[in-house]
Amino acid sequence: MIDKTYQPGEVEGRISSAWEAAQAFRAGRPDRAKAEPYCIVIPPPNVTGSLHMGHALNNTLQDILCRFERMRGRDVLWQPGTDHAGIATQMVVERQLMERQQPGRREMGREKFLARVWEWKAESGGTIVNQLKRLGASCDWSRERFTMDEGLSKAVLKVFVDLYRAGLIYKDKRLVNWDPKLLTAISDLEVMQVE
């Protein structure tokens, strides 16, 4: 008999575990060796926060496409990951250090501060991944990436140098938003205009 009300806590974990045990969403499985590939890379959410309704909508639409293509027999890779968010992450970690009355970025030095950022990423990055898993996202979780992973960083650097040499990236003069506290340029999106 079916219960009158849906109890997600009793159902979703069990189904998620079954999917994982069956490697249901793993790309490149031997039984799909001759299947035509289909790939989507999740526009990586920033590791600085939690998912919002926009993420839920976007990931639901991607999930629909991936599941549809799997049903059509294609070998689907839905690549999950998170973005390091640069200055935003730096600001969050610096704020945390200040609240805990610990030495700041300059006192720590670059290497120790970067190690602290990686610790923080391990803590908060898991929140986003767990939220995506709870949504039932049919990603290949064995291929999860982070935009500061060594391989990705090397690839970005190579492409940047190639684009520079091709004249598609250039140095020019432009007004930038300078943060006197962080001593760095910040994005237009991070500036609050006040008159």
Image (tube, rainbow, N blue to C red):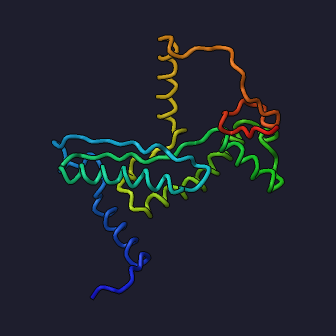
Quadrant where the N terminus sits is bottom left
Q: For the view shown, which residue lies furthest in the left direction?
A: 34
The x, y position of residue 121, in whole percent, is: 60, 50
The x, y position of residue 55, in whole percent, is: 48, 52
- How many numbered markers are drawn? 0
Q: For the view shown, which residue lies furthest in the front direction?
A: 195
Which of the 4 image quarters holds residue 8?
Answer: bottom left
Q: Nearer the viewer, residue 105 or 46?
A: 46
Residue 88 in the image: above or below residue 60: above
Q: For the view shown, which residue lies furthest in the bottom direction?
A: 1
Residue 169 in the image: above or below residue 6: above
Q: Residue at x 52, y 25 (%)?
A: 157
Which of the 4 image quarters holds residue 187?
Answer: top right
Q: Residue at x 52, y 39 (%)?
A: 147
Q: Residue at x 30, y 85 (%)?
A: 2
Q: Residue at x 73, y 29 (%)?
A: 177
The x, y position of residue 135, in whole percent, is: 43, 62
Which of the 4 image quarters holds residue 115?
Answer: top right
Quadrant where the C terminus sits is top right
The x, y position of residue 18, in whole percent, is: 31, 67
Query: Left of 18 or right of it: where is 31?
Result: left
